[in-house]
Image (cartoon, rainbow, N blue to C red):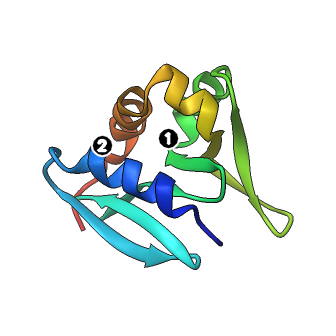
Amino acid sequence: MPYDPHLADLMRGALESRSGITEKKMFGGFCWMLNGNMLCGVGVGRFMFRVGKELEAEALLRPGAEVVDFDGRRMGGILWVEADACLEIGLEDWLSFAARFAGSLPPK
């Protein structure tokens, strides 16, 4: 998955004050983990957030959100969010939303 270096820098900045965050190369780009569980990532022109299947319907009501589909395989509970829509709502808001799920998982 190609990624946008500018969006990666924005994500790093938004995550720098949070504890338990690590950065990992995944899917040809970067993802960030919360206590070892995937929290978010970046693509080209969009962010990726792991919200879990239980919060997916609520998250899809937000502007710019759609389910991740890798080569025809739907990734339930993981969403793409168009960068402009995400930044309009606020990257911190999306991170807090995704952390509701990732933060509920046992540390790895």
User: Residue at horizontal 50%, vertical 21%?
Assistant: 89
Q: In the rendered view, would you say 25 is above or below 63?
A: below
Task: Tell me the crowding category of disc 2: few under 14, some 14 to 19, or many 20 or more residues within 10 angstroms, Cα based.
Answer: some
Q: Is residue 45 visible?
A: yes
Q: Residue 59 at what x, y percent from top left?
A: 59, 28
Which tag, 1 or 2, sits closer to the chain's start? 2
Nearest the viewer among 15 and 69 is: 15
Q: Residue furthest right?
A: 72
Q: Residue 1 at what x, y percent from top left?
A: 65, 72
Q: Provide the secondary structure element on which disc 1 rests.
A: loop
User: Residue at horizontal 53%, vertical 22%?
Assistant: 88
Rounded to the nearest angstrom, the CA distance separating label 1 from label 2 is: 17 Å
Q: In the rendered view, would you say 107 is above or below 103?
A: below
Kindly identify the amino acid type of the residue bearing the numbered disc 2: Ala
Q: In the rendered view, would you say 56 is above or below 10?
A: above
Task: Tell me the crowding category of disc 1: few under 14, some 14 to 19, or many 20 or more residues within 10 angstroms, Cα based.
Answer: many
Kindly identify the amino acid type of the residue bearing the numbered disc 1: Val
Q: Residue 106 at what x, y percent from top left?
A: 24, 56
User: Residue at horizontal 43%, vertical 78%?
Assistant: 25
Nearest the viewer among 4 and 22 is: 4
Q: Provide the secondary structure element on which disc 2 rests.
A: helix
Q: Is residue 103 visible?
A: no
Q: Give the mark toward the camera: 1 or 2.
A: 2
Look at the image and tell me in which quarter the C terminus lies.
bottom left
Residue for badge 1: 51
Tell me whether the residue at label 1 lies in contact with that at label 2, contact meaning CB atoms closer than 8 angstroms. Answer: no
User: Residue at horizontal 61%, vertical 59%?
Assistant: 43
Residue for badge 2: 14
Left or right position of 69 against 11 = right
Answer with the quarter of the image where residue 27 lies.
bottom right
